[in-house]
Image: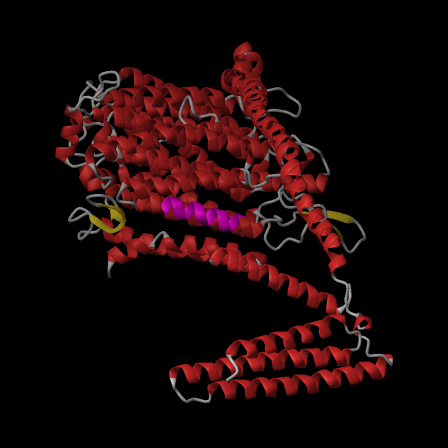
C-alpha cells in the first residue's frame, strides 16, 4: 500500500516542474504545458486526499472524482483558448516567444 | 329704493374710472374723458338721490343712515369700513357732487379737447399752441391739446373718489384714508406739469406742509383709538365717551384728553385747510392746471379740512356750555381762524396774479369757517363751507377761463406777457361776456354783496354769530377782513374786466368754449341762490318769509343749540352791509380805470407796507431761513459729511479693510500654503510613485508570474506566522 505522502510528494514535484517550466521557458506552448502540469499536480492532490478521506471514514462518495473531472474540463478549455491565442499571436508576429508579447506594456 | 346700498355705491364710479383710464383707455382722450365725466355723473346722480331722500320727511331727521362692514380684525373687535348719511354729510355731498361734476366738464374745455396737437408740446409742460396755415397762407397760432390729457382725468377721478370717501365715511379710519389719498392727488396734480421746476417745488411743498398737519392728526386719531377702542363716529361722539374724555386728564399741559385730541386734529385741519402757519402751500398750488386749483380750493382738499373740523365739533366743543367760556381748542380755533382771515386778506390786496388773489381769498374764507367753528357758530360754518365751495369753484374756473382767453389773445398778438398778471388784462367784459357775468356773480358772492348773493348770507351769519356770542374781537377782525375781501375782489374785477385793455392780448381775448362756460353758469346759479336756503328768521323784512331751511336741517347736528338765536341785534347786519358795499365801491373807485403801464395805486399809498404784503409777510423767506436752510445745512454738513462720510462710510471702510487683510492672510498662510501646496504634493507624489513603480511593469508575463509567486510566498509566510 502506497502511503498518502508519496502521492503528495509526486504532486509537489510535478507542480514545481510545472512552475519551473512556466517561469523559465520562452516558448508559449511550453508555458502552457507547464500550466497543464501544475493543474494535473493539483488533480493528483485532490484525488489522493479524496481517496484517503473515503478510506479513513469508510464513506463512499464521488465528489473528489467530480472535482478532478471539472478541473480537467477547465484545463481542456484553457488549453483550447490558450492555443487559439498562441496561434493568432503567431500569425501576427511569426513568433511564440512569451517575452515578446508585450505590446500592452506602459 | 335701497338708500343704504346707493350710499355705498356713490364713491365707486370715479375709482373705477381711475383704474379704467390708467390701465386701459389712456391712449384715447375721448374715451378717457367720457369715462371720467360719466363716472362723476353717476356719483352725482346717486348723491342727489340720496340727498333728496336725506332732506325729505323720511330722511336723516328720522334716522341717521349708517352702515358698516368689518374690515381688519383686531384683538376684541374689528376696524370697519362704513358709510353714513347725516345732515352734515348730506349737505357736503350736495356741494361736492355739484362742484366735482362741473369741474370735470370744465376740464374738457380747459385742456383744449378737439384742438390739434402742438408741434413743440411735450408731456410735463403746458401746451404751447400749434401753428397752422390759413387759406390766405398766413400762419395762425391755435390752442393745442394738453399732452397728458387722459392722465389728468385719471387723477381728478381719484381725487373725487377720495373726497366722496371722506365725506361719506362713518369712521375716522376711512376718513383718514380719503384724506391721505387726497394728499397724494394734490401732489400729483399740483405737479402735473412736472417739467416746470416751480410746479415740482410747489407739489413737494404742498405734500410736505400738509404732512406736518397729518402727523399730528394721526397722533390724535391714535390717542382717540387708544382711549375709546373705536373709530366709529357713533361711539366716539356718544355722550358717555365725550364726558369720559372731558373728565380725564392728558399728560400734556394739564389739558383734558378731549382738548388734546381736539388740538391734534385741529393741527391736521390747519395743514389741510391751509391756516396760518401752514398756509404757505396753498398759493403755490396755483402751479397746477386751473381745474385742479378749483378742485383743491373748493370741492375737495381744503373743504375736507373744514369738514373734519365740523365733524369733530362734538369733541372740540366737549364741555362747552355756550357763552364766552370756550374750550381751549375752540379758543385756539377762533384765534387762528380770525387771524388767518385778516392776515390772508391783507396779502391778497397786494397780489397781481389773478389766481394768487383767489388763493389768498380762499385762505381768508377758510379762516372765517375755522373762526366760526371756534366760536361755536356751527351751522354758520357749514353754511359758509357750502356757499364758499360754490363761489370759489366758480371764481377759479372763471379765472381759468380768463387765462385761457388771454392765452388765445397772446397767440394772436404774439406778445410775451404773463397771462395771469391782472395788470396785463382789462376790458375783458366785452370780449368774454359770459365769463364776466359769471365771474361777477362769484366775485360779489365772495365779497358778500347784500341780499342776492350766497356769500352775504353765510358771512352775515358768521358775523352775527360772533357779535351775538359776545366775541367782539373776533367780530371786529372778521368785519375788517370782510372789508378787505370786498376791496380786493373789486380790485380784481375792475382790473380784469373793467377799464380798457392794457395789452394787445387782452384786446384779442376770446370767449372760451361751452364746456367751460356751462359749468360757470351752473356754479354761478348756486353762488347766488345757495344762500337763500339759509335766511335767518330774525332778519328784518324778509326773514321768515322764506323758511330758514338750512338752519333747521343742520341745527340738530349739535347737542347744545346755538347761542345767538335769542338776540336780534342789527349791528352785524349793518356791519355786513357797510363793509361789503364800502369795500366794493372803494375798489371800484381806485381801480376802475388803470391805464397801461400805470403802477398799482396801492404801491405809493401803502409805501413799505405794500412791499411786505406783496412778499406775503416774508413768511416763505422766514420758513426758508428757519427750516429749509437749517435742514439743508444739517443734511449737507452733519448727515452727509459727518455721519455718512465719516461714521457710516468709515465703519464700512474699516470692515472692508479688515476683511481684505484677513483674506490676504488666509490666502497666504492657508490657501496657498496648505491647500494648494498639499494638493500639488499629493499629485506629484502620486506621479513620482507611478514613475518609480513602472519599472515593475516589464510587460513579460513570466515576470508577473514570479511576482505573483513571490507575493503568495510572502503572504503565505505572513499568514502562517500570524496565525500560528
The location of residue B471, given as percent across then percent down, is 25, 18
Residue at the limit of the structure toward the front, as seen here: A1
Q: Is residue B546 visible?
A: no
Q: Quadrant of the N terminus of chain B?
A: bottom left
Judge left or right: residue B482 versus residue B503: left
Q: Which residue is at a point 85% across and 81% down the rendered structure image?
A: A92
Above or below B210: residue B547: below
Above or below A91: residue B540: above
The location of residue B552, given as percent across then percent down, is 20, 40
The location of residue B566, given as percent across then percent down, is 15, 26
Span shown in magenta = B152-164
Residue sitting nearer the eye, A41 or B489: A41
Residue at the limit of the structure toward the left, as seen here: B240
Residue at the limit of the structure toward the right, as seen here: A94
Q: Is residue B405 visible?
A: yes
Residue sitting nearer the eye, B77 or A25: A25
Q: Which residue is at a point 60% across and 78% down the rendered structure image?
A: A10
Judge left or right: residue B534 versus residue B387: left
Q: Which residue is at a point 27% across and 25% down the rendered structure image?
A: B374
> Is B405 within the magenta?
no
Above or below B51: residue B216: above
Above or below B42: residue B273: above
Judge left or right: residue B666 versus residue B622: right
In the rendered image, which quarter is residue B308 located in?
top left
Amino acid at each position: 500500500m502506497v502511503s498518502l505522502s508519496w502521492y503528495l510528494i509526486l504532486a509537489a514535484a510535478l507542480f514545481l516542474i510545472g512552475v519551473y517550466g512556466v517561469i523559465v521557458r520562452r516558448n508559449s506552448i511550453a508555458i502552457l504545458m507547464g500550466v497543464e502540469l501544475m493543474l494535473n499536480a493539483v488533480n493528483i492532490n485532490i484525488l489522493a486526499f479524496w481517496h484517503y478521506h473515503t478510506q479513513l471514514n469508510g464513506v463512499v462518495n464521488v465528489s473528489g472524482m467530480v472535482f478532478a473531472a471539472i478541473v480537467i474540463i477547465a484545463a481542456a478549455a484553457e488549453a483550447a483558448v490558450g492555443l487559439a491565442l498562441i496561434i493568432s499571436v503567431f500569425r501576427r508576429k511569426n513568433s511564440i516567444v512569451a517575452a515578446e508579447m508585450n505590446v500592452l506594456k506602459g | 329704493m335701497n338708500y343704504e346700498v346707493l350710499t355705498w355705491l356713490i364713491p365707486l364710479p370715479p375709482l373705477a374710472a381711475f383704474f379704467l383710464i390708467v390701465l386701459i383707455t389712456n391712449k384715447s382722450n375721448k374715451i378717457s374723458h367720457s369715462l371720467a365725466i360719466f363716472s362723476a355723473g353717476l356719483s352725482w346722480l346717486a348723491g342727489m338721490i340720496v340727498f333728496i331722500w336725506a332732506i325729505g320727511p323720511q330722511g336723516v331727521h328720522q334716522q341717521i343712515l349708517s352702515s358698516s362692514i368689518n374690515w381688519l380684525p383686531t384683538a376684541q373687535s374689528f376696524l370697519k369700513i362704513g358709510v353714513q348719511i347725516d345732515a352734515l354729510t348730506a349737505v357736503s355731498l350736495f356741494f361736492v357732487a355739484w362742484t366735482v361734476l362741473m369741474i370735470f366738464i370744465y376740464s374738457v374745455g380747459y385742456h383744449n379737447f378737439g384742438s390739434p396737437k402742438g408741434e413743440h408740446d411735450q408731456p410735463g409742460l403746458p401746451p404751447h399752441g400749434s401753428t397752422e396755415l390759413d387759406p390766405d397762407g398766413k400762419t395762425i397760432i391755435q390752442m393745442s391739446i394738453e399732452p397728458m390729457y387722459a392722465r389728468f382725468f385719471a387723477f381728478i377721478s381719484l381725487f373725487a373718489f377720495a373726497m366722496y370717501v371722506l365725506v361719506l365715511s362713518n369712521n375716522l379710519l376711512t376718513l383718514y384714508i380719503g384724506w391721505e389719498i387726497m394728499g397724494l392727488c394734490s401732489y400729483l396734480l399740483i405737479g402735473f406739469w412736472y417739467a416746470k421746476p416751480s410746479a415740482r417745488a410747489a407739489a413737494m411743498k404742498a405734500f410736505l406742509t400738509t404732512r406736518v398737519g397729518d402727523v399730528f392728526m394721526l397722533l390724535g386719531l391714535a390717542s382717540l383709538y387708544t382711549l375709546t377702542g373705536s373709530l366709529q363716529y357713533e361711539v366716539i361722539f356718544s355722550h358717555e365717551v365725550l364726558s369720559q374724555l372731558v373728565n380725564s386728564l392728558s399728560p400734556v399741559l394739564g389739558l383734558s384728553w378731549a382738548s388734546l385730541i381736539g388740538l391734534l386734529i385741529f393741527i391736521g385741519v390747519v395743514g389741510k385747510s391751509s391756516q396760518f402757519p401752514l398756509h404757505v402751500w396753498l398759493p403755490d398750488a396755483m402751479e397746477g392746471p386751473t381745474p385742479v386749483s378749483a378742485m383743491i380750493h373748493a370741492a375737495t382738499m381744503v373743504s375736507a379740512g373744514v369738514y373734519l373740523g365740523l365733524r369733530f365739533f362734538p369733541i372740540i366743543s366737549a364741555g362747552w356750555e355756550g357763552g364766552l367760556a370756550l374750550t381751549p381748542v375752540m379758543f385756539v380755533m377762533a384765534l387762528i381762524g380770525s387771524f388767518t382771515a385778516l392776515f390772508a386778506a391783507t396779502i391778497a390786496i397786494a397780489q397781481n396774479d389773478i389766481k394768487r388773489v383767489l388763493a389768498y381769498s380762499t385762505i381768508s374764507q377758510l379762516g372765517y369757517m375755522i373762526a366760526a367753528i371756534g366760536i361755536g357758530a356751527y351751522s354758520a360754518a357749514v353754511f359758509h363751507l357750502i356757499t364758499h365751495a360754490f363761489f370759489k369753484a366758480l371764481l377759479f374756473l372763471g379765472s381759468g377761463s380768463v387765462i385761457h382767453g388771454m392765452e388765445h389773445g397772446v397767440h394772436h398778438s404774439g406778445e410775451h406777457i404773463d397771462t395771469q398778471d391782472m395788470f396785463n388784462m382789462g376790458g375783458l367784459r366785452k370780449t368774454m361776456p359770459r365769463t364776466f357775468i359769471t365771474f361777477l356773480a362769484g366775485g360779489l358772492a365772495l365779497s358778500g354783496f347784500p341780499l342776492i348773493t350766497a356769500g352775504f348770507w353765510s358771512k352775515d351769519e358768521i358775523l352775527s354769530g360772533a357779535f351775538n356770542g359776545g366775541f367782539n374781537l373776533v367780530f371786529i377782525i372778521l368785519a375788517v377782513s370782510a372789508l378787505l375781501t370786498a376791496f380786493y375782489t373789486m380790485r380784481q374785477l375792475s382790473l380784469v374786466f373793467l377799464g380798457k385793455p392794457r395789452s394787445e392780448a387782452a384786446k384779442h381775448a376770446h370767449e372760451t368754449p361751452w364746456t367751460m362756460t356751462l359749468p360757470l353758469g351752473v356754479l354761478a346759479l348756486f353762488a347766488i341762490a345757495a344762500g337763500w336756503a339759509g335766511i335767518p328768521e330774525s332778519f328784518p323784512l324778509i326773514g321768515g318769509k322764506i323758511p330758514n331751511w338750512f338752519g333747521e336741517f343742520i341745527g340738530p347736528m349739535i347737542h347744545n343749540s346755538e347761542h345767538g338765536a335769542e338776540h336780534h341785534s342789527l349791528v352785524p347786519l349793518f356791519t355786513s352791509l357797510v363793509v361789503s358795499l364800502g369795500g366794493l365801491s372803494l375798489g371800484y373807485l381806485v381801480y376802475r380805470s388803470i391805464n397801461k403801464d400805470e403802477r398799482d395805486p396801492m404801491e405809493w399809498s401803502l409805501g413799505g407796507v405794500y412791499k411786505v404784503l406783496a412778499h406775503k409777510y416774508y413768511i416763505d423767506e422766514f420758513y426758508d431761513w428757519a427750516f429749509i436752510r437749517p435742514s439743508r445745512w444739517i443734511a449737507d454738513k452733519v448727515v452727509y459729511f459727518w455721519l455718512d462720510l465719516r461714521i457710516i462710510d468709515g465703519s464700512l471702510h474699516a470692515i472692508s479693510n479688515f476683511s481684505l487683510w484677513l483674506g490676504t492672510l488666509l490666502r497666504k498662510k492657508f490657501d496657498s500654503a496648505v491647500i494648494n501646496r498639499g494638493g500639488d504634493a499629493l499629485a506629484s507624489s502620486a506621479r513620482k510613485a507611478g514613475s518609480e513603480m513602472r519599472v515593475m511593469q516589464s510587460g513579460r508575463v513570466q515576470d508577473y508570474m514570479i511576482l505573483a509567486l513571490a507575493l503568495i510566498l510572502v503572504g503565505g509566510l505572513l499568514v502562517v506566522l500570524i496565525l500560528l
